[in-house]
Image: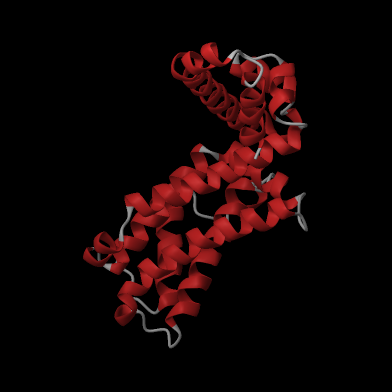
Amino acid sequence: MRIYIYMQVLYCQAQYIRPDIKDNMAKSSLAPQQARSRESLRKLLKAAAEVLGQHGLEGTTIPRIARHAGLTPGAVYRRFPDKDALLETVILGILERQEERLRVALTPQMARQIPLAVFAEQLISSMLISYRASAGLLRAVRQFVQGRDQTAFYKKAARQEMRAIEYLMELFLLHRREIRHREPPVAVAFALMTLTSTLIELILVDHDLRYWQALIPKDDQALKRELLRNFLSYLGVEPKSG
């Protein structure tokens, strides 16, 4: 919506140009302006995500985002009224791209050809790597979203996240004959929920885990094995030995 309003301002400004000049500008000037506007917005959203990941929610400020994007704070405020509006756009974009990448990287045709246990192992490995690499960003996104409950943004974010989860469920249920749980959809949903909750607790929740070291896997390889064993066991699938 902010992009639409901004482009309407450019259009209204063009109404005051003489008709003979306006026709030429429509071909030679307006398109580059629109391209520059889109590129400027892309840089701004990318910078906001990077600052959010590096400095956390409290450390993410409009001046810091503007510097990172090579813009002035005024240029940011011309697009977004405040930090919350900017971060809402950033986070919804992240969720949209996440779903798009998931659907491109893993199609139903591909999922059918992968044994269920291998599919689960690949998913868990990918999620573990992603959570480790993007812990700062994921932590800040989670904090921001939780602080915006009961808002239209929260509902949009929840719907987008649910679409991605439902798509993963559909892929796993292509192997429903291998799932021995008497309610395969419930089993897959709960297994995914348990997996995500465990990763959040061990990686994203900002607390001291020193006192838990004797009780949790010693490294990510061991953690992956336990997550996979737990996931498959809940589905009623026999994990590989080892």
Task: Kindly tell me whether residue 180 is visible in this rendering.
Answer: yes
Tell me where residue 121 sits by quadrant. Answer: bottom left
Q: Position of residue 147 (x, y in %)?
A: 77, 49
> Which residue does the image show at 44% across and 61% down from the upper left?
226
Q: Is residue 219 visible?
A: no
Q: Quadrant of the C terminus?
A: bottom left
Q: x%, y% of residue 38? A: 53, 26
Residue at 67% x, 50% y is: 211
Is the residue 94 above or below the residue 214 in the image?
A: above
Observer-nearest of 58 and 235: 58
Rendering coords of residue 159 (x, y %): 59, 60
Say which quarter of the image contains residue 136. Answer: top right
Q: Quadrant of the N terminus?
A: top right
Residue situated in front as seen by the camera: 35 or 23:
23
Residue extending farthest left: 113
Q: Nearer the viewer, residue 189 or 30?
A: 30
Q: Horizontal and vertical percent for residue 234?
A: 45, 75
Residue at point 31%, 74% (across, down)? 175
